[in-house]
Image: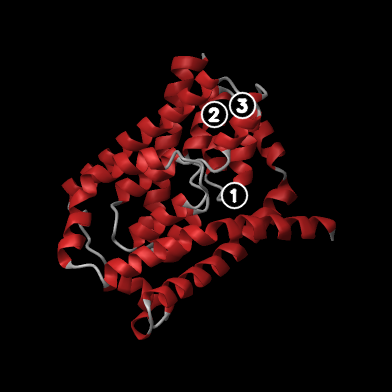
């Protein structure tokens, strides 16, 4: 019973933290859809090439809701897939607070942050270029109304504040249920047990660390960071795991973007980039 209460408490706290991010994101999306002129919309979509740079820089700021906001904006056609990938790669949930609280070397912290920013920006730009060359929806245009129709929120019948509130409540309920289930699984299996396997196989461990990072739960980033600081994880595994730590953004992506094929491709791309970069970092700095 005590474990159940702890899981319930942790899930509630993590979900409540997302409320301002989700509400403000949906409010901005509703404004764009209902109030902004075509000129403003064209300017937003035209700035797509700069999106990965902005996303890569802003994503590194320790705010758990930014990846969720990026997933929402991508699903609404406001930002490109490369911009979202840049945010996913540069963000890492609780990494920075843990590094600071553990009084890690400032140079080490800066190296990790800069590395994540660079990977996020470069990967985001390359992804956008690839999508544009292949001609598969680089400029999709705003389609926030598609989300509204799917969620049956009847946005056109009320104010944008009401619509944003309805969307926020719906996604929060979804996030809460999924997060609770994931927290229960993590507690049952034990994140430390998973990471112990990673430490025994340096290169193979990078692949597993990348998978651990994909778990949309703050326990992943916390455990990876702590294990690295304690010398249990090598630098390559740490980097791969923290790159793939997109947090709650992955849950929001699967909830709001209704093309599961694209979602799976996005996750595979995120994982592939994280593992490749982890291997490169391990070869350059770990061996």
Q: Secondary structure at mark 2?
A: helix
| Residue bearing the label numbered 3 | 228
| Residue bearing the label numbered 2 | 237
Q: Horizontal placement of 13 versus 37: left or right?
A: right
Q: Which mark is residue 21?
A: none
Q: Quadrant of residue 74?
A: bottom left
| Residue bearing the label numbered 1 | 217
Q: Quadrant of residue 213?
A: top right
Q: Is residue 163 above or below residue 221?
A: below
Q: CA distance from mark 2 to mark 1?
A: 18 Å
* Disc with the residue nearer the chain's start (2 vs 3): 3
Q: Quadrant of residue 34?
A: bottom left
Mark 1 Cα shell of 10 Å, populated few (<14), some (14-19), many (≥20): many
Q: CA distance from mark 1 to mark 3?
A: 18 Å
Q: Are marks 2 and 3 in contact (CB under 8 Å)?
A: yes
Give the residue at the far right of this rendering: 1
Q: Is residue 22 above or below residue 147?
A: above
Task: Inspect this view and state whether residue 143 appears.
Answer: no
User: How far across and down, in percent of the image, does residue 283 sit?
Assistant: 45, 17
Q: Residue at x 22, y 60 (%)?
A: 140
């Amino acid at each position: 019973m005590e474990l159940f209460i702890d899981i319930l408490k942790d899930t509630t706290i993590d979900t409540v933290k997302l409320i301002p991010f989700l509400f403000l994101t949906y409010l901005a999306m509703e404004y764009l859809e209902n109030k902004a002129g075509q000129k403003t919309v064209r300017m937003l979509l035209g700035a797509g090439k700069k999106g990965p740079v902005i996303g890569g820089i802003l994503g590194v700021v320790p705010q758990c809701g930014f990846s969720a906001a990026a997933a929402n904006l991508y699903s609404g056609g406001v930002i490109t897939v490369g911009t979202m990938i840049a945010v996913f790669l540069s963000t890492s949930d609780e990494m920075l607070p843990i590094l600071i609280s553990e009084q890690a070397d400032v140079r080490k912290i800066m190296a990790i942050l800069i590395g994540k920013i660079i990977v996020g920006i470069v990967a985001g730009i390359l992804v956008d270029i690839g999508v544009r060359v292949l001609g598969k929806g680089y400029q999709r245009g705003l389609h926030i109304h598609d989300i509204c129709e799917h969620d049956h929120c009847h946005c056109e019948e009320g104010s944008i504040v009401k619509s944003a509130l309805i969307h926020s409540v719906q996604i929060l309920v979804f996030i809460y249920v999924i997060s609770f289930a994931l927290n229960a699984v993590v507690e049952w299996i034990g994140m430390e047990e998973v990471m112990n396997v990673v430490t025994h196989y340096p290169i193979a461990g990078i692949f597993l660390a990348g998978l651990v990072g994909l778990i949309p739960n703050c326990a992943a980033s916390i455990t990876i960071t702590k294990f690295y600081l304690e010398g249990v994880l090598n630098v390559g595994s740490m980097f791969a795991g923290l790159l793939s730590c997109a947090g709650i953004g992955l849950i929001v992506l699967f909830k709001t973007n209704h093309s599961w094929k694209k979602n799976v491709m996005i996750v595979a791309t995120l994982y592939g980039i994280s593992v490749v970069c982890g291997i490169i970092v391990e070869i350059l700095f770990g061996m």
